[in-house]
Amino acid sequence: MKILKQNKKAFTLVELLVTLFIIGAITSLSVIVFDVSWSKSRDNKRISDIIRIQNILESYHRNEGRYPDSITFGGDLISSSSIVYMLNIPINPSPRDDGDCLDEEYQYGTSTDLYGNENFYIEFCVGANTDQIIKGQNCATNQGITSGACNFGNLKSGLRLWLKADGSLTSHFLNGNDYVEEWNDESGSENDIIQTDSDKKPTIATSTSNGQPGVRFDGTNDYLSGGDILNSFNSGRTIYVVGKSNAADGAFVTKAMDASEPGNYGLFYDNSNILYLYQNIDGNYNVTATSTAGVYQIVTTESNEDLQQNNLYLNNILVGTTDITSWQGLASSMHFLVGATNNSLNNGETLFLDGDINEILIYDRILNDIEKNEIYNYLQSKYGL
């Protein structure tokens, strides 16, 4: 009997390599699909968790009258009266570095606007576009969820003076003009400024920049005084003024005199330049920038103790910087004036403003970039600048 032998053909090396390549490609593709699926699942959980936390925070606010100062992700949210609002507040699921996201936990905080309205914010990140949520950093507040990092600060913190022409003014009407007797401080610091002399009272201009009211100074003898206020700026100071000068010279706000005295500061037009005066025990460290008279502007100044630096901004653009050799606490004995400055006497007013002032904000600290942008956006939108 003959036994037939079948020849079995083996895989060649090339065929084996091709087969292994195909298997590897399929495996890799499976891993990628699996990873994308899990990443999407994590993003969906992030959004779901954030919405849950938003709702719980609103419930907390309704019952407690405020938002919690802090929350611990992974911990519990329980009020001081032992009301349990949420157990095991969700944490950011791991791995957290999906897409362009960093490996970090959600960030929670509260903010307060100029009017004292409180808000909360939660900053979180998703790796890909998910429904209406854009990939990358997002910010959840009581108004919803917006794309980008959270931009909030406590704008009431350190606010020592807030005067606005659309706010609280005491005036009297005479011969077709509304004369300002008192401009009330709305910062809560009670730094009201007044004018008791009927011949030196500025008037109310009902429509100035963007149709907003302003306090109008005649350039001859109008001014308002707060007396010896706004001292002790030991850690720095930030000033915002919205207004215009029609003349080449004129003071917006000053606590200074022409003669030397440490602690002087002021903001005014000088020979058609905008000038921020700062004087310490070593001398003057002023910042000057070219500016156009007759134009409404947002003028911002900073005296920064940490950096030992004075900065001047026009419409949120840095236009001048001066280094300070040593820090002086900015505590002058001179009167704080709006619309004028003093000469060597405390009652020797000069450099009267011919122009309008719409709003003044003075802080006893340096604002961070987020806070500065918030203030600028508020003023820019209000006055159309």
Image (cartoon, rainbow, N blue to C red):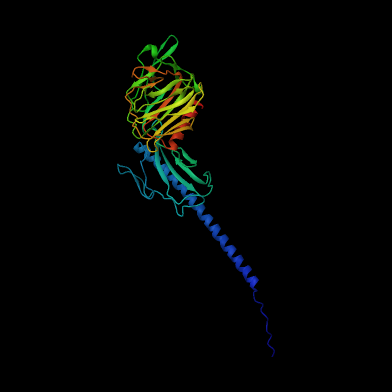
Residue farthest top in this picture: 175
Question: Which quadrant of the rendered structure holds the N terminus?
Answer: bottom right
Whether residue 27 is visible here, answered yes or no, is: yes
Residue depicted at x 44% and y 12%: 177
Q: In which quarter of the image is residue 229?
A: top left
Q: Residue at x 44, y 37 (%)?
A: 369
Residue 179: horizontal and vertical position, in percent? 41, 14
Compared with residue 252, is residue 159 higher up or lower down, i.e. above or below?
Answer: below
Nearer-the-camera pick, 172 or 231? 231
Quadrant hosting residue 217: top left
Relative to 311, 35 lies left or right: right
Q: Nearer the viewer, residue 204 or 324?
A: 324
Q: Position of residue 6 (x, y in %)?
A: 68, 82
- Vertical comparison of 20 with 191: above or below: below
Question: What's the residue at 65%, 76% (across, down)?
Answer: 10
- Viewer-proximal residue, 246 or 61? 246
Q: Could you tell me which residue is drawn at 54 percent across and 60 percent down?
A: 31
Residue 137, position in %: x, y? 49, 45
- Residue 93 screen position, x and y as percent: 44, 52
Q: Could you tell me how many numbered marks the image carries? A: 0
In this view, the residue farthest toward the left is: 81
Residue 284 against residue 194 in the figure, above or below: below
